[in-house]
């Protein structure tokens, strides 16, 4: 993986549609591309990670001109990927948000977030840790560079122990692979006191679809015809499948008494 510093012209993007999933009004991404390499994600295509060196200067200028609202950090690229160890851009952004008293919602797969736990405690913030499977073998295929599920769950527990609003996201749910794990994931999220469990099905578009299916052919060849059928008409799976997935999630969320959406 190669790292490069760049300067950006703008950093705050307004979310124009109502964000029912993450409840954000703006988003900010300190890095371009992501080294965790998830197979289902556009951010993992390139092998160069660009760190936006002037992100805080630009953020300060822009934040003074926008209405108060919740900023999502990491909606496109993980803000606690390994580059953050060196560059600390996410940490600098959080310090700026604390200064301007803007609330935030951090999306990540990384326990590196625990480094900033004191800062998070001083902010109006929530954290969502993404967890798509508990099976290391599954994740080695679909999320080869991402932290282990065990470390992600430990991070949720530690954040909750420190009073930080934290939930888990099963996003995306990988068809015909994760169904058998859904109850265990909901239970695991509940065991570490996650306050909500978000979920969304897998979308397959363009180059990402090609890459994903190439990997399926290697690791799960028997599923290829099923995927062709499931995604025959659209980049979303068939409506009936989505409906059944949602029902299954609702059932387990009710069983373990964990909300299936953000209620904080
Ligand atoms: S961690 Fe997130 S941003 Fe990074 S490759 Fe995976 S899904 Fe994409």
Image (cartoon, grey):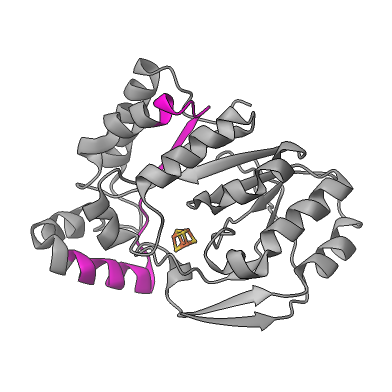
Q: Give the magenta part as a residue range.
A: 189-216
Please state which of residues 1 and 103 is positioned toward the viewer in this rendering: 1
Answer above or below: position of 37 versus 45.
above
* Relative to 135, 197 lies left or right: right
Q: Residue furthest left?
A: 222
Answer above or below: position of 69 versus 28.
above
Please state which of residues 1 and 132 is positioned toward the viewer in this rendering: 1
Q: Residue furthest right?
A: 64
Picture quarter containing residue 248?
A: top left
Tell me which residue sits at (42%, 75%) in the image. 45
Q: Is residue 126 visible?
A: yes
Tell me which residue sits at (59%, 56%) in the image. 74
Whole-percent x, y for residue 90 in the image = 68, 59
Picture quarter containing residue 122?
A: top right
Whole-percent x, y for residue 35 in the image = 46, 69
* Relative to 237, 5 lies left or right: right
Please state which of residues 86 and 8 is positioned toward the viewer in this rendering: 86
Q: Is residue 22 visible?
A: no
The quadrant of the rendering that contains the C terminus is top right
Tell me which residue sits at (89%, 64%) in the image. 61
* Relative to 191, 239 lies left or right: left
The answer to whether residue 205 is magenta is yes
> How many discs mark residues in the rendered view?
0
Tell me which residue sits at (26%, 51%) in the image. 136
Whole-percent x, y for residue 164 in the image = 64, 33
* Relative to 159, 230 lies left or right: left
Whole-percent x, y for residue 130 in the image = 45, 46
The answer to whether residue 66 is magenta is no
């Amino acid at each position: 993986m190669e790292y490069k510093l760049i300067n950006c012209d703008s950093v705050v993007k307004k979310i124009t549609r109502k964000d029912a999933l993450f409840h954000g009004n703006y988003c900010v991404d300190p890095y371009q591309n992501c080294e965790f390499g998830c197979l289902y994600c556009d951010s993992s295509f390139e092998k160069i990670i660009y760190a936006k060196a002037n992100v805080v200067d630009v953020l300060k200028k822009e934040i003074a001109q926008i209405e108060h609202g919740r900023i999502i950090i990491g909606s496109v690229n993980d803000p606690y990927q390994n580059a953050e160890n060196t560059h600390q851009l996410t940490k600098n952004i959080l310090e700026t948000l604390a200064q301007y008293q803007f609330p935030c919602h951090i999306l990540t797969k990384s326990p590196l977030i625990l480094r900033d736990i004191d800062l998070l405690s001083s902010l109006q913030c929530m954290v969502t840790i993404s967890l798509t499977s508990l099976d290391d073998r599954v994740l080695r295929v679909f999320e080869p560079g991402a932290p282990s599920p065990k470390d992600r769950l430990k991070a949720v527990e530690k954040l909750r122990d420190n009073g930080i609003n934290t939930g888990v996201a099963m996003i995306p749910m990988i068809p015909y692979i994760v169904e058998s794990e859904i109850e265990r994931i909901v239970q695991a999220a509940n065991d570490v006191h996650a306050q909500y469990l978000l979920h969304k099905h897998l979308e397959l578009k363009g180059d990402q679809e090609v890459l994903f299916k190439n990997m399926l052919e290697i690791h799960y060849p028997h599923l290829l015809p099923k995927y062709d059928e499931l995604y025959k008409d659209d980049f979303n799976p068939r409506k009936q499948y989505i409906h059944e997935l949602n029902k299954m999630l609702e059932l387990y969320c009710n069983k373990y008494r964990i909300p299936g959406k953000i209620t904080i």
